[in-house]
Image: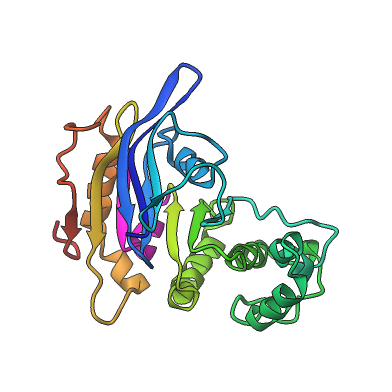
Amino acid sequence: MKLEISGLRFSYSDREVLDHLDFQVAEGEFVSILGASGCGKSTILKLLTGVLTPENGRISVDGKEIRGMTEHFAYMPQNDLLFPWKTILDNVCLYGRIHGNLESARKEAMENMAAFGLAGYENAYPSALSGGMRQRAAFLRTALCKSEILLLDEPFGALDVITRGEMQDWLLSMREKMNRTVVLVTHDMDEAIYLSDRILILGGRPSNVVCELRPEVPPQGRSRDWLYGQGELRKQIHREIMKDGGGAGGSACPPERKAHGTDL
């Protein structure tokens, strides 16, 4: 198993946010985490990156326990955080500059500009790019990090609905090319359904995983038409999120429930 979290507990001051959090992510899997605001979704990513320290529990990558900041994870926040005084090429090569391999980073970045929809904008500044293009630049910067696991914290949340849909289509097309394990935090049910191999729903006070769903994808693959037909899955996710204090034992969802199209 690529990533394993077991018995994780964390509190802010006197408010316990996570308790007995357990889940796993396989190599190359795309897992989304959904839940009500304030349930600890982004906190999980901060614990994985080492920005926060758990009070209890274990985080393992490839079977080995990790503590603090490591190079296993590359984190992408909601805002693009591009430096306005640097060109797009310089922005996406930040990791290479920090780690002393700027030349190889620039070469790899140039090879990927077209795939990320940035060809011709290498020497432009962030102010010249649309919101979607800025997010693709931020995504390229994250992808150029030599980390096996990408942590995406609502990366498209600040975009308008049309651009967000375009970015979701783009990310779906890039999944196989990137060949990375991905953990996505989102408030968007459709985004989770459209992109994920599995969806984990947080609930309870303090939070843990109360439901796990696997959208069943047809042989021809995912499409917007397929997504629009996932009404029952959407209802199931909404019910689980809206349950009041539905912690361990409070959810009707089995530990892993497969969503068969619109028949749950």
Q: Is residue 200 magenta?
A: yes
| 227 and 13: which is toward the camera | 13
For residue 3, side relative to residue 46 (left or right): left
User: How many dots with numbers?
Assistant: 0
Q: Is residue 150 magenta?
A: no
Residue pictured at 83% horizontal, 62% vertical: 86
Which residues are drawn in magenta?
A: 188-202
| 116 and 7: which is toward the camera | 7
Residue pictured at 53% horizontal, 66% vertical: 167
Q: Can you see residue 140? A: yes
* Residue 31 x/y as whole percent: 36, 57
User: How is this picture coloured?
Assistant: rainbow
Rendered image quadrant of residue 82: bottom right
Rendered image quadrant of residue 25: bottom left
For residue 68, side relative to residue 3 (left or right): right
Residue pictured at 49% horizontal, 75% vertical: 174
